[in-house]
């Protein structure tokens, strides 16, 4: 399936043969989706009756959204590619996605937004790991 992310990678004028384009495209997309889900989840937590009970979730959501957004941006820039930086970003992103997924999962039975966010975090964590394995 063609997406704007895949189309942009395909349009890149230099050779990208050193990277698995499908895994790169999927990882960028999952990072963007996860950042949105985490931002929305943090906002929904703030609207709950007892947001003080969700402080750790809100903080983890915010951290995850920032790291996922930064990872998507770094992965989208191919000129002057540095495999060490890319791998470090992916490792950090996978780590925060695991932490956020775990935190949101602990609230999933009570808050549907946390369940949805946990699922997005798990997909992003896996996409990061899959891309790392292909580097």
Image (cartoon, rainbow, N blue to C red):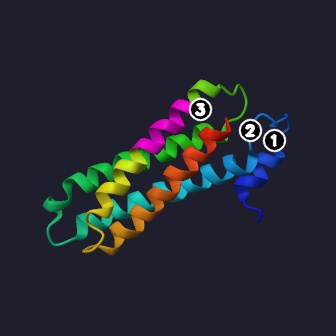
Q: Which mark is residue 19?
A: 2
Displayed quadrant of residue 121: bottom left
At numbered mark 1, what does the secondary structure look like: helix, strand or loop?
loop
The image shows residue 61 at horizontal and vertical percentages of 34, 53
Residue 31 visible? The answer is no
The image shows residue 23 at horizontal and vertical percentages of 68, 49
Residue 86 visible? The answer is yes
Q: Which residue is mark 3?
A: 86
Position above or below: 84 against 32: above
Position above or below: 80 against 7: above
Q: Nearer the viewer, mark 2 or mark 1?
A: 2
At numbered mark 3, what does the secondary structure look like: helix, strand or loop?
helix
Q: Which mark is residue 12?
A: 1
> How crowded is the residue under tag 2: few (<14 C-alpha within 10 Å), some, or many (20+)?
few
Measuring 47% from the left and 44% from the top, which residue is drawn there? 94
Q: How far apart are the two marked residues, 3 and 1, measured between alpha carbons?
A: 18 Å
The image shows residue 1 at horizontal and vertical percentages of 76, 65
Whether label 3 touches label 2, CB < 8 Å: no
Principal SS element in the magenta part? helix
The image shows residue 58 at horizontal and vertical percentages of 27, 55
Q: How far apart are the two marked residues, 2 and 1, measured between alpha carbons?
A: 13 Å
Query: Residue 88 magenta-drawn?
Result: yes
31 to the left or right of 79: left
Measuring 35% from the left and 63% from the top, which residue is drawn there? 41
Q: How far apart are the two marked residues, 3 and 2, measured between alpha carbons?
A: 11 Å
Disc on the earlier residue, 3 or 1: 1
| Residue range of the region highlighted in magenta in the rendering | 86-95
Measuring 14% from the left and 59% from the top, which residue is drawn there? 52
Displayed quadrant of residue 114: bottom left
Disc on the earlier residue, 2 or 1: 1
| Residue at the extreme front | 133
Query: Residue 78 magenta-drawn?
Result: no
């Amino acid at each position: 399936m063609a997406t704007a992310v895949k189309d942009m990678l395909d349009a890149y004028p230099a050779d990208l043969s050193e990277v698995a384009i499908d895994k790169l495209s999927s990882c960028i997309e999952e990072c963007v989706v996860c950042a949105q889900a985490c931002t929305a989840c943090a906002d929904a937590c703030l609207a709950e009756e007892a947001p003080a009970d969700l402080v750790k979730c809100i903080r983890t959501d915010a951290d995850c959204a920032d790291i996922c957004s930064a990872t998507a941006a770094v992965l989208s820039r191919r000129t002057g590619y540095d495999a060490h930086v890319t791998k470090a970003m992916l490792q950090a992103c996978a780590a925060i996605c695991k932490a956020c997924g775990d935190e949101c999962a602990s609230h999933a039975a009570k808050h549907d937004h946390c369940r949805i966010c946990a699922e997005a975090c798990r997909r992003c964590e896996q996409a990061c790991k899959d891309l790392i394995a292909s580097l």
